[in-house]
Amino acid sequence: MNLNERQELFKIIFEKANKEMKGLIVLGDYRRRRLNFFQKKRCVKAINIFNEGLELFPGHWQSLFFVGKLYQAMGQNEKALNYFENTLQHERFNHVVLQEASLAAMQEGLTEKGIKYSGESIEMQPENYSLLGNHSMNLLIGGFDEMALKTIDQALGINPNDGINKRVRDKIIGVIEGKISRPTFSELI
């Protein structure tokens, strides 16, 4: 099969996989919703279709990313993280990929790795108050309370009305003052 034929076949496979995963993944939201049996079957089917395309073009970062998101939707964060890290080998400068890698790492209890990825995401988008809020949560979980407070204050300086970041700040202050115990990642989402 020549390159043009492979590209044409890949395009068909990619579109089919995208159609199959429609409505199954959420971008930019930490709150995981429960998938039912049929939705999980669709996730597996979409993963299999994406993998067909990855056989043709193994470095297609969008396919790798979506497979990671599908595993994440099913709660298989270790597999999701593997795909996000593979994506980063091909697309290193995408804050969304870094954010999702951070999320998967934190859900797996890999706090150091989660902080690394969320820190890299805000290096790319230093004025993104959502990314700053996510990073401050990671820092709080990791025990870097003063840095977490500085980061959340930076986020609230950009958008002082963000309710989520206000709640994160309250948690940080509560931990610093000893009024509440250090939250886990699952308690914060």
Image: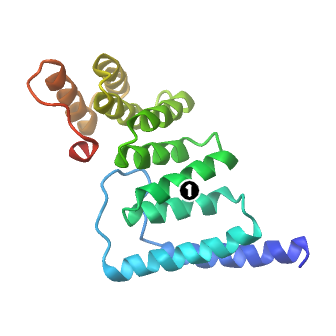
Q: Position of residue 36 (x, y in %)?
A: 30, 77
Asked if residue 35 is positioned above or below residue 79 in the image, the reply reads below
Query: Residue at image x 45%, y 64%?
Result: 71
Q: Position of residue 59 (x, y in %)?
A: 72, 58
Q: In the orientation shown, which residue stands out farthest toward the right?
A: 2
Q: In the orientation shown, which residue stands out farthest toward the left?
A: 179
Count of marks, rendered view: 1
Q: Position of residue 55 (x, y in %)?
A: 72, 71
In depth, the one of 52 and 127 nearer the eye is 52
Quadrant housing residue 141? top left
Asked if residue 19 is positioned above or below residue 136 in the image, the reply reads below
Q: Is residue 21 left or right of residue 85?
A: left
Quadrant housing residue 53? bottom right
Quadrant housing residue 6? bottom right
Q: Is residue 140 left or right of residue 40?
A: left
Query: Residue at image x 53%, y 32%?
Result: 120
Q: Is residue 6 left or right of residue 41?
A: right
Callout 1: helix, strand or loop?
helix
Q: Classify 10 Å Cα crowding around label 1: few (below 14), some (14-19), many (20 and above).
A: many
Q: Position of residue 184 (x, y in %)?
A: 24, 40
In depth, the one of 65 and 15 nearer the eye is 65
Asked if residue 127 is positioned above or below residue 14 in the image, the reply reads above
Query: Residue at image x 50%, y 37%?
Result: 117
**Residue at the spot of label 1:** 83
What colouring method underlies this structural image? rainbow
Query: Residue at image x 61%, y 79%?
Result: 16
- Mark 1: amino acid: Tyr
Q: Which quarter shows the N terminus?
A: bottom right
